[in-house]
Image: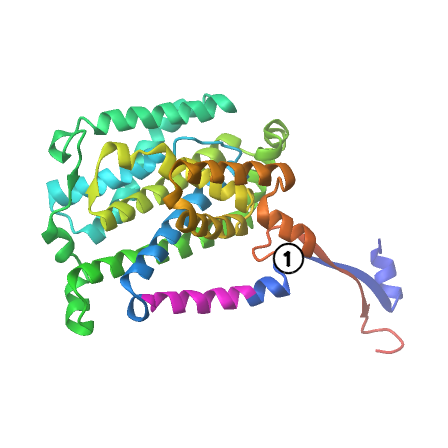
Amino acid sequence: MTTGLETMTNPDLTQERWRVETRTRLSTLFAGFAVLLLVALAFAPFLVSRGVVQDLFFIFTMLVLAQNWNLLAGYAGLISVGQQLFVGCGAYALFGLVILLGVDPILAVPLAGLFAATIAAPTAFFAFRLHGPYFAIGTWVIAEVGRLLFAQWKSLGGGTGTSLPRDATRDMLGVRLLNDWFGMKSSTAADALAYWLALLVVAVTVACVYKLLRSKQGLGLAAVRDNETAARALGVDARRLKVAVYLLTAFLTGVVGALIYLQKARISPDAAFSLTDWTAYVIFIVVIGGIGTIEGPILGVVVFFLMQNALSSYGSWYLMLLGALAIVIMLFAPRGLWGLISERTGIELFPVRRILKGGPIQKKTMGGPNG
C-alpha cells in the first residue's frame, strides 16, 4: 500500500485495477445471433405453414413455463407443484374479460397476467409458511382448490367449460389489418397474433431472468437458495426476494395461460388446471435440460417436443419413456443435458458467474525523471 509521501517521491506508482465481468466473447456473439434469430422467427407466419406456426407457439409457451418454474426452483429454491394454478387463473381471466366484459382478447392477455399475480399474493401468505416438501404439497393443494372454485363459475360453463365467441377472435386487434394487408384468413391471422405475443413473452422472460440473475438481487437469490440462514445473517431479505420472484412468475405464467387458451379458444377446469400438462411436463423439461441454468430449459423443451412428436402415438408407453429418460438423466447427469455439455466444453451462453479481471498497472507521475 502506498502512502502520500511515496506518491510524491516515487515516479513509478503501481496500482491495481480490477473489474468484475459476467459476459464472455462467446456470450456476446450468441447475443447477436439470438437477435437475428428473433427477427427471423418474427417472419415465420409469412414463410411457413400454419401447422409449423402452431408447433413453434407450443415450444414458446412451454419454454416460458419452464423458465419460470426454473427461476422458482433452480434459483429461489421454491419447489412448486402448483404452477397450473396460474395457468388456469390467466386462462379463466381471459375468458371472463372477453365474454363477460367484452374486452379485446389482445388487451385481455396482460390483464390476465395481472389477475394471476393478484391471486398469487394471498396464496403466498399461506404457501410461504411451509418449507421443503410441505411447500410443494401446499402449492398443489392450493391449485386444486382453485380448480374446484373455478368449476363453480356457471357463467363460464361451470365444470364443462365454454368456448370463446367466434366474433371475439375474428375481430380482435390486428386481425383485420392482416386480412387487408397480407390476405390472411381470420383463423390464420389469429394464430399469427398469438404466435407473435408468445415470441415477445419468450424474449421478455429470458431477458428478465438473465438481468435478474446478473444483478445484486440475483446474488441474494442464489445465497438464499444455498443457505437461507447465512443469507439472512448477511442482510439479505429472503422473504421479500422469494415473494417478488413468486409474483413475477405468477404474472408471466398467467400471461402464458391466457395465450394458450386464446389459441385453443375453449376452456374447462380440468384442462386449464391440469397438473400433468402445466407442471409435470414443465418439471420434466427443466430436469432433463438442466435446472439452475437459462440454457437448460431451452434445450429441454426442444427434446420434449421431439419426443412428444415421435412417441405420443404409443399411449401410456409415451409417459413411461419420458419418466425413464428423466430417471436416467438424474442418475448419470444430475445437472441435466446442458450441465453435461457445459461441464465438458465450458460453454456458457448466458453466463451469470462473476469473473474478476485486471491486475497491477504502472502509472507515471508528472514530476518523475521521464515526465
* Position in image of residue 88 (x %, y %): 29, 36
Image height check: is 238 above or below 113? above
Image height check: is 369 above or below 91? below
Q: Is 345 left or right of 68, judged from the image as shown?
A: right
Q: Amino acid at mark 1?
A: Ile
Comparing 2 with 137, the one in front is: 137
Q: Residue at x 64, y 29 (%)?
A: 230
Image height check: is 145 above or below 83? above
Q: Is 117 left or right of 176, judged from the image as shown?
A: right
* Position in image of residue 302 (x %, y %): 46, 53
Q: Residue furthest bottom?
A: 370
Residue 196 visible somewhere in the drawing: no
Q: Is 18 left or right of 162, judged from the image as shown?
A: right
Q: Residue at x 25, y 48 (%)?
A: 109
Q: Is residue 40 magenta?
A: yes
Per the rendered image, the range of residues in magenta is 30-44
Image height check: is 133 above or below 236? above
Q: Residue at x 46, y 26 (%)?
A: 136
What kind of secondary structure does the magenta stretch mostly adopt?
helix
* Position in image of residue 132 (x %, y %): 52, 24
Q: Is residue 153 magenta?
A: no
The residue where tag 1 is placed is 347
Mark 1: secondary structure: loop
